[in-house]
Amino acid sequence: MILSHDSWQAIQLTLALAGLTTLVLLVLATPLAWWLSQTRSAWRSPIQALVSLPLVLPPSVLGFYLLIVMGPQGPLGQITQALGWGVFSFTFTGLLIGSVLYSLPFSVQPLQHAFEAMGSRPMEVAATLRASPLDAFVHVALPLARPGMLTAAILSFAHTVGEFGVVLMIGGNIPGKTRVVSTEIYGHVEAMEYAQAHVLAGGMLLFSFGVLVALALLNRRQGQILK
Amino acid sequence: MTQPIHLQVRLSRVEFLLDVKLQLPAQGITAIFGPSGSGKTTLLRATAGLEKMERGLVQIGSSIWQDTQQGVNLPTWQRPLGYVFQESSLLPHLDVQQNLDFGLKRALKSSDRALFDATQSMQTSIELLGIETLLKRMPDQLSGGERQRVAIARAIAMQPKLLLMDEPLASLDEARRQEIFPWLIRLRDELKMPMLYVTHSLEEVTRLADHLVVLDKGKTSAQGPVVDVFTQVGNPLRLGDDAGALIAGHIGAIDSQWHLSRVDFDGGCVWIRDTGFPVGKAVRIRILARDVSLATSEPQNTSIQNHLHGSIQSITPDAHPSQVMVVLKCGAQEVLARVTKRAVDELGLQVGMPLWVQVKSVALVA
């Protein structure tokens, strides 16, 4: 056994976090991306900027604010405490919220591009075929945006697996609870356990490379379909 | 359904102000003709509810789809219409059969038509457009012409109260266009539903339209039965050299020895090349003004075979100062003749005068 029990736990936790984050993001990002692709509202630009913020913000800044908002004195913390859910900081739920926000642009942008590339014609066609807006969204827009949705899912998953700063700030690196692969590697290095760090770091390298190759293949295939 | 269609649309665009008020027949093809930028497509889209209008009324028979005065405005998906877009509009993720089903399934759900036979309707539209062999194909495996036929079949399968077609042939090459014409003519002759057909092609107007609306910079410059609009002087169609009458008639006789067929119409008859149409077949012919000459006595010893008898209805100046356009009434039919002013003077032509009309050439258009 090359990997310690702790490392296995970290891997499991990472996969669970990334999987859940991806699911939550697809549910949240799809309507958000649709709205951004269709609206002419004055709110579009500020919302678009807000969604993209995690791309440029240091993860520690996002983590810091989330820690304060979710903490016992923070507005979200007050609400969750009042509801009897306790405080989310240093919990898996807290990590999930952080991950969702941190990976939001990675799911919104591919979806939004897919919806924008579709143009207004398919929705007009659906309307002339008696489909209500919701009906047309579900049966025309979503199927047509499927490649974008797949890209969004892969990017969200991979990006969540690779996050470090937000996890460290919100999660606190508690083994079995909030310690993920990236923070586990950090721990190994701090403890001079380079062999363990090598295995995990190498695994991450291969994983990330594999994801990018898969995306490239996916895009090429879509390119062919479009021709 | 014999009540007419009322269409009033007012909306402004950068290029034009669309402002029309039309009353259109409840049957047959109404062509909306005009140069690009005249507002044809916008008018069609507004009728479908795809464009916001400032003021307007869309009333099909007794049902009102839109009336800005009363604040009625049905969204597109609640209007029982069929729409054929200029370029392919098939849903790319569905095969041909699923594309046909998409509209029909939803049309069945709308309350006012619980009674129509979906299977029958599907079958009829598949046959009318000849797409039986394409049903399992995906849209990207079809040719441009096939795609448009599927799109038309998809629209008529829903049995719309109004079929809107936006230059359905414009994206096709000449061979494909010719391939679709017979299907469109069949639609016109076999379906009862009214159709609005946007086009900038004179050929499509002469072959397909029963009624014609000419748009120019957002305004109606002429409208009426297509054969009437063609002989209006100062022709809004701006046909120039192609000015001439469009005549609806039928094959009255066939002369197999000389390979000719006779086209009879109210006002006379002309012989044309025999194209294999049977006696009784409804046809349309075009007689260009430049191919018509006038004689005050019955022409004799001439190689021109086709003579009509009529009287002068009007004489108006033509584009060039040397020429005039003479409108002749032959029976119920009007014929145009472009002759020189000098000829008018030498022959002493006047309104009301009976004349012999010599027709040098006749084109069969449909």
Image (tube, coloured by chain):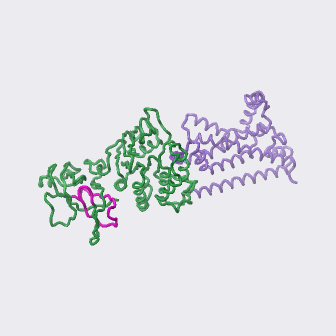
Chain colours: A purple, B green
Q: Where's residue B71, x and y in %?
A: 46, 33
Q: Looking at the image, is A71 positioned above or below residue B38?
A: above
Q: Nearer the viewer, residue B186 or A133?
A: B186
Q: Quadrant of the N terminus of chain A?
A: bottom right
Residue B313 falls left or right of residue B217: left
Seen as rendered, the residue at the extreme bottom is: B257
Q: Where's residue B263, x and y in %?
A: 28, 61
> Is B206 within the magenta?
no
Q: Nearer the viewer, residue A199 or B133?
A: B133
Q: Where's residue B97, x and y in %?
A: 55, 56
Q: Residue at x 48, y 60 (%)?
A: B130
Seen as rendered, the residue at the extreme front is: B115
Q: Residue at x 61, y 50 (%)?
A: A143
Q: Which residues are magenta?
A: B264-292
Residue A104 falls left or right of residue A171: left
Q: Classify residue A177 by image quadrant.
A: top right
